[in-house]
């Protein structure tokens, strides 16, 4: 599997990608909320932000195959207008709410605390790729037992698990979390892996114009998908490189171990020449 990583402005770099060559775009752009990414990318006013969002979408959209998909992370502040624009050229399949499971800590006294991201899931055509079996959630033993009445016996859905709903309740990454890299808005692998498994065929290609710490690159590498991505900040780019290298090293180690086990077993049966 290839991982093509570029320390470059996505709006420039995506021009080199062939049209209709990407199965899945995962875009987690600056949210237009003034976050510090070590550059000015998140310091646009509301109108400029919408114009910039339209520009990156126009650059990325032609790269998708006819049955490709696009997931866009945003927050409630700008998702209504950005999603409206995306709907002028894509079909919206879901709005997924990522409940970040933020613990209650007092919070604001003038409004309700905001604890979710809005993720738009869009497709180019009705014939989009979607592998629900790859992302089913197994029922726990208790639920299975509760469904043990005769009308449920042999029901396929009880055995294979259920289709994830559109509210994804996954904890944000705390500073101490094993997955955590030095990036202010790193997404949990669990979320991005679900997108990759459901919406990119094995051996297909994922494009992420705004890699940040490279969560999508890691998800693609772990699941046998090709990857191409861009990140402006050189420090974050270095994090992406080392996270992707760690996956590759892990996979190499695993392959070597398997190879070793195989050769030992073959040696014992006297078939060493097989190697
Ligand atoms: C919301 S973060 C992405 C976080 C990422 N999904 C993760 O899990 O780590 C957005 C990133 O886009 C980068 N960025 C902003 N404008 C960019 C551009 N024009 N081209 C490439 N990267 C850009 C920022 O530096 C920031 O790291």
Image (spheres, rainbow, N blue to C red):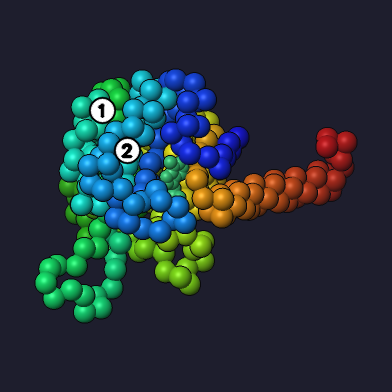
The residue singled out by tag 2 in the image is 52
Image quarter of residue 200: top left
In the rendered structure, find residue 248 and report the number of the disc placed on it.
none
The residue singled out by tag 1 in the image is 90
Viewer can see residue 157? no
Looking at marks 2 and 1 on the same chain, the residue that comes earlier in the sequence is marked by 2
Of residues 129 and 232, which is closer to you in this image?
Answer: 232
Q: Residues within 10 Å of mark 1 (few under 14, many from 20)?
A: some
Where is 40 relative to 179, above or below? above
The answer to whether the residue labelled 2 contacts the one labelled 1, judged by CB atoms less than 8 Å apart, is no
Q: Which of the image's four quarters has the N terminus?
A: top right
Q: Determine the secondary structure under disc 2.
A: helix
Of residues 232 and 198, which is closer to you in this image?
Answer: 232
Q: Residues within 10 Å of mark 2 (few under 14, many from 20)?
A: some
Measuring from the top left, give residue 88's x and y in whole percent.
20, 27
- The residue located at (43%, 20%) in the rendering is 20
Measuring from the top left, give residue 202's x and y in whole percent.
49, 33
- The residue located at (83%, 37%) in the rendering is 275
């Amino acid at each position: 599997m290839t991982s093509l990583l570029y320390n470059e402005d996505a709006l420039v770099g995506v021009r080199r990608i062939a049209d209709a060559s990407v199965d899945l775009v995962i875009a987690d752009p600056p949210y237009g909320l003034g976050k510090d990414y070590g550059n000015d990318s998140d310091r646009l006013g509301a109108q400029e932000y919408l114009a910039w969002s339209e520009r990156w979408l126009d650059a990325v959209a032609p790269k998708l195959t006819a049955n490709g998909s696009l997931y866009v992370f945003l927050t409630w502040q700008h998702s209504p207008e950005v999603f409206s624009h995306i709907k002028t050229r894509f079909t919206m399949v879901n709005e997924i709410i990522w409940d970040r499971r933020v613990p209650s800590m007092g919070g604001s006294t003038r409004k309700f605390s905001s604890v979710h991201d809005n993720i738009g899931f869009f497709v180019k055509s009705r014939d989009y790729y979607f592998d629900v079996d790859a992302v089913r959630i197994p029922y726990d033993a208790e639920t299975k037992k509760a469904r043990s009445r005769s009308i449920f016996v042999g029901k396929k859905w009880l055995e294979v698990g259920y289709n994830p709903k559109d509210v994804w309740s996954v904890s944000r990454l705390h500073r101490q979390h094993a997955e955590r890299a030095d990036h202010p808005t790193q997404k949990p692998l669990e979320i991005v892996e679900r997108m990759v498994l459901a919406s990119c065929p094995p051996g297909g290609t994922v494009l992420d114009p705004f890699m940040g710490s490279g969560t999508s690159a890691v998800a693609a590498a772990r699941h046998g998908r090709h990857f191409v991505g861009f990140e402006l900040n050189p420090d974050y780019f270095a994090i992406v490189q080392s996270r992707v290298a760690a996956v590759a090293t892990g996979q190499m180690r695993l392959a070597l171990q398997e190879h070793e086990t195989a050769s030992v077993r073959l040696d014992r049966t006297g078939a060493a020449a097989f190697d």
